Amino acid sequence: LYADDVVLLSSTFEGAQAMLTRLEQKSIPLGLLINVSKTQAVSLNHSPKRPFTTSAGAIESCNSFVYLGCMVPRSDDDINRRRSLAWMAMGKLRPLLHSSLQLKVKAKLFTVLVETVLLYGAETWTLTPSAEKKLDATHACLLHSAMNLCWPNKTTNGEMYRMAELKHPSV
């Protein structure tokens, strides 16, 4: 049996250690073991004095990790990761999107297959003005590419968003 994606939150080291110990005690009778090589601990606003431990050993400390597809707790790192993943998704779709499909179909495909990759987890981000600017610019560039609008045609972002019937992600 596997139990993935469990997060324990506590305001103190002692509280978190107690929760981890209790989780381990309740899991063992069910045949579940905590794999210390796949378990990580993040401490916010301070460094732990000692590592968290289980009966199998110490838990590795780290600054961030991927949880349910999002970087925790670093919004900027997650935004950069999502931007890269969205470009990879666009690369896979480019032959389809650069075909003779109607613009509205391309816009719908973009929304479903690229925008969702870019904005996944966005509700958890702390957006700085700089990050918001990067996100909007990436979204616009991806949409330009999806709609196969060549730069020499000088289609403005405003026109492009109207044609696609979409809004900037930060709006």
Image (spheres, rainbow, N blue to C red):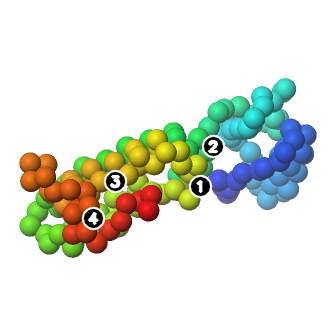
- Specify whether 160 is left or right of 30: left
Name the residue type under label 1.
Answer: Thr
First in sequence, mark 1 or 3: give its number. Answer: 1
The residue labelled by disc 2 is 73
Residue linked to disc 1: 124
Q: What is the distance, in whole Å, between disc 3 and disc 4 at their CAs?
A: 10 Å
**Which residue was labeled with disc 3?**
139
Indicate which disc, 4 or 2, sits on the residue closer to the N terminus. 2
Query: Looking at the image, which residue is at 77% across and 55% down?
Result: 31
Q: CA distance from mark 1 to mark 2?
A: 9 Å
Q: CA distance from mark 1 to mark 3?
A: 18 Å
The percent coordinates of residue 4 (x first, y second) are 65, 53
Q: What label does residue 11 carry, if any?
A: none
Q: Secondary structure at mark 3?
A: helix
CA gap between label 4 and label 2 equals: 32 Å
Dot 3: within a 10 Å radius of its alpha carbon, few (fewer than 14), some, or many (20 or more) residues? Answer: many
Q: Secondary structure at mark 4?
A: helix
In the image, what residue occupies the spot 9% across and 53% down? 153
